[in-house]
Amino acid sequence: MKIQQNISLKEYNTFGIAANAKRFISVSSVYELQQLLKTEKEVFLLSGGSNMLLTKDIDMLVVHLNITGVSIDTEDDKHVYLTVNAGEDWHEFVLWCIANDYGGIENLSLIPGNVGTCPIQNIGAYGVEVKDTITKVEGLEVATGKLVSFSNEDCKFGYRNSIFKNTHKGKIVLTSVGFKLTKKDHQLNTSYGAIKTELASRKVIKPTLKDVSDAVIAIRKSKLPDPKEIGNSGSFFKNPVISKKQFLEIQKVHANMPNYIVSENEIKIPAGWLVEQSGFKGKRFGDAGVHEKQALVLVNFGNASGQDILELAKKIQITVFSKFQISLEIEVNIV
Ligand code: EPU
């Protein structure tokens, strides 16, 4: 364990933003992290760096969480219970589960980031949210270094949300996540239109976990930029929820606006559609831009700063608001 000085964080965030850490340390065990928290009171936690936009250099000590390892706690006929350390790469973990025929997270294939951050924003894709497989989340209290454990209920999961984004933001370092996955009678979720189409085009009739995962990987690759090639953080905005009254007003002008019913009086509108209708899809402003195939994803073509991306996001928010009177909320953590 050694603190390094003036380290560029470009390789540590999927947006590829070249902000600097004044001091940087990588920890590979809970014990190391506990020791560190005894002496350092203000730390900046960095895991997979897949859901953040760095808009400035970091003065605090940047702690890179590199605690890895997967263990099987217990299993019965139908289920396996796993504890996965925070530093494991999410997609590698999904592939490992599929290779072992453990079901439940196959729809979440190819999502960038580490296991330790999946509960924070309750990652979700193609009709599945990670909260449905999480049994517990463990971590350390930043202030005391004390071990803490949260049940699924304690986490208060919601759409792209949990207590780790709200009341507990910055207060807990997540060190491991517990999962309950199926060993047989897998509950495949293939209702999402794009998955159905992809499986049909592959002539798959009775899909396996791997078939679903392969379909999701193909869909994501066709729509979403690979952060290794073009910097990005996935969906930059949340899909907004509007009132039914407002929805009906907008629909008079935009009859084909995609929408999902949330409740009797609430309708969710895809932010990607709003951004596209506002003329931003595929637009580039210097090295900051909007992805050409999915307008919900802002991209860094190489040397954009966090401020460049944020300015573009603000421009989009203003345009969408003036056209639709809908406020787009940023999903990515702005640092
Ligand atoms: N749409 C457009 N233009 C676009 C993009 C989308 O008109 O440029 C329309 C599509 O035609 C479709 C609708 O918007 O009717 C929904 O698009 P899509 O299926 O791509 O899903 P999304 O709502 O835009 C969400 C998640 C993604 C996740 C997909 C698939 C959020 C904020 N985003 O996107 O998550 O992969 O569903 O389930 O909920 C992420 O969080 O990083 C992420 C990529």
Image (cartoon, helix red, strand yellow):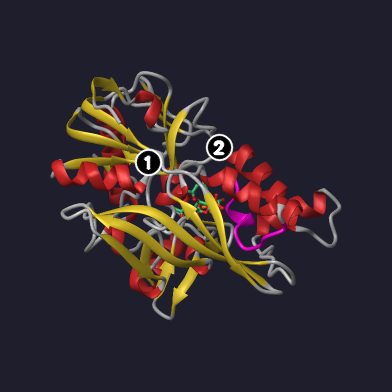
Q: Are marks 1 and 2 in contact (CB under 8 Å)?
A: no
Prevailing secondary structure of the magenta residues: loop
- Of marks 1 and 2, the one in the foreground: 1
Under 8 Å from ligand 1: the CB of mark 1?
Answer: no
Residue 35 x %, y %: 23, 44
Residue 72 x %, y %: 58, 60
The residue segment tinted magenta is 101-111
Q: Which residue is painted at 29% across and 24% down in the image?
A: 305
| Element marked by disc 2 | loop
Compared to 7, does 200 lie above or below?
below
The type of residue carrying mark 1 is Ser
Check residue 224 in the rendering and tell me which mark sits there, or answer none. Answer: none
Q: Nearer the viewer, residue 31 or 233?
A: 31
| Total count of labels | 2
Quadrant of the rendering where the C terminus is positioned: top left
Q: Which residue is painted at 31% across and 39% down in the image?
A: 313
Tag 1 residue = 47
| Element marked by disc 1 | loop
Q: Nearer the viewer, residue 238 or 108?
A: 108
Q: Is residue 304 left or right of residue 204?
A: left
Residue 124 x %, y %: 50, 57
How packed mark 1 is, by other alpha carbons closer than 10 Å (few <14, some 14-19, many 20 or more), is many
Under 8 Å from ligand 1: the CB of mark 2?
Answer: yes
Q: Which residue is painted at 44% across and 60% down in the image?
A: 269
How packed mark 2 is, by other alpha carbons closer than 10 Å (few <14, some 14-19, many 20 or more), is some
**Residue 319 in view here:** no
Gap in Å between the C-alphas at discs 1 and 2? 27 Å
**Magenta highlight on residue 108:** yes
Check residue 293 in the rendering and tell me which mark sits there, or answer none. Answer: 2
Q: Quadrant of residue 137?
A: bottom left
